[in-house]
């Protein structure tokens, strides 16, 4: 009985750790903290998001985050929800997340709203959970242009 209870508690703690990892990742991306993004991804991570090139290895993606933060004037907000995490082994898991993204780019005078789904794999190494692969597919996208009189008009939508 205790063995089963210990196994179940350990599984719950692993799922909680993976959910915290994904929250740290989104927070780091939104705040432009490239080094914190690096600490969420395995060195050989595969990153494949609609609207971005595919990255094999974390360094290229981390560079994109660093460059975006250096430009300034852009604000990013990822709202991840409905996590569905499944442990597939003692040191591996898969996860599906829904996401809503709100972005503001002052220089381009645009507001972006995007919804999508993430499909991730996770690996535990040296007692630490990492994102091994992450893919995101958009389910909807709207872009608004804000003119000089602060009037918004839709310039694209899916």
Image (cartoon, rainbow, N blue to C red):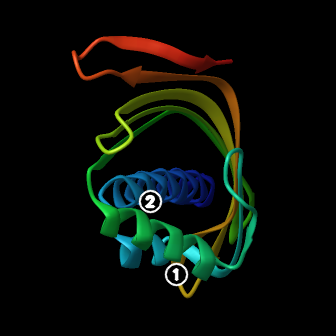
Q: Note whether 148 is above or below 74 in the view shown.
A: above
Q: Which residue is mark 2?
A: 25
Tell me the residue at 58%/70% (across/down): 61
Q: Quadrant of the C terminus?
A: top right
In the depicted view, which residue is nearer to us: 36 or 124?
A: 36
Q: Can you tell which mark lies on residue 127?
A: 1
Tell me the residue at 45%/21% (across/down): 144
- Sequence-wise, the earlier of marks 1 and 2 is 2
Q: Residues within 10 Å of mark 1 (few under 14, many from 20)?
A: few
Q: Note whether 116 is above or below 43 in the view shown.
A: above
In whole angstroms, how far apart are the C-alphas of marks 1 and 2? Answer: 18 Å
- Position of residue 53 in the picture relative to residue 128 (left or right): right
- Percent x, y for residue 48? 73, 57
* Mark 2 secondary-structure assignment: helix
Q: Residues within 10 Å of mark 2 (few under 14, many from 20)?
A: many
- Position of residue 104 in the picture relative to residue 8 (left or right): left
* Mark 1 secondary-structure assignment: loop
- Percent x, y for residue 149? 22, 15
In the depicted view, which residue is nearer to us: 30 or 99?
A: 30
Q: Residue furthest left?
A: 149
């Amino acid at each position: 009985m205790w063995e089963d209870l210990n196994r179940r508690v350990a599984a719950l703690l692993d799922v909680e750790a993976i959910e915290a990892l994904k929250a740290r990742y989104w927070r780091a991306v939104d705040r432009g903290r490239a080094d914190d993004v690096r600490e969420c991804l395995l060195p050989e991570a595969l990153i494949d998001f609609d609207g971005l090139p595919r990255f094999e290895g974390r360094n290229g993606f981390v560079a994109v985050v660093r460059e975006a933060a250096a430009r300034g004037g852009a604000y990013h907000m990822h709202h991840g929800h409905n996590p569905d995490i499944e442990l597939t082994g003692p040191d591996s898991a898969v996860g599906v997340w829904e996401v809503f993204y709100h972005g503001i780019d002052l220089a381009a005078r645009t507001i972006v709203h995007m919804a999508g789904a993430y499909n991730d794999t996770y690996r535990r190494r040296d007692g630490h959970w990492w994102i091994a692969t992450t893919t995101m597919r958009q389910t909807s996208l709207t872009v608004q242009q804000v003119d000089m009189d602060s009037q918004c008009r839709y310039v694209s939508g899916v």
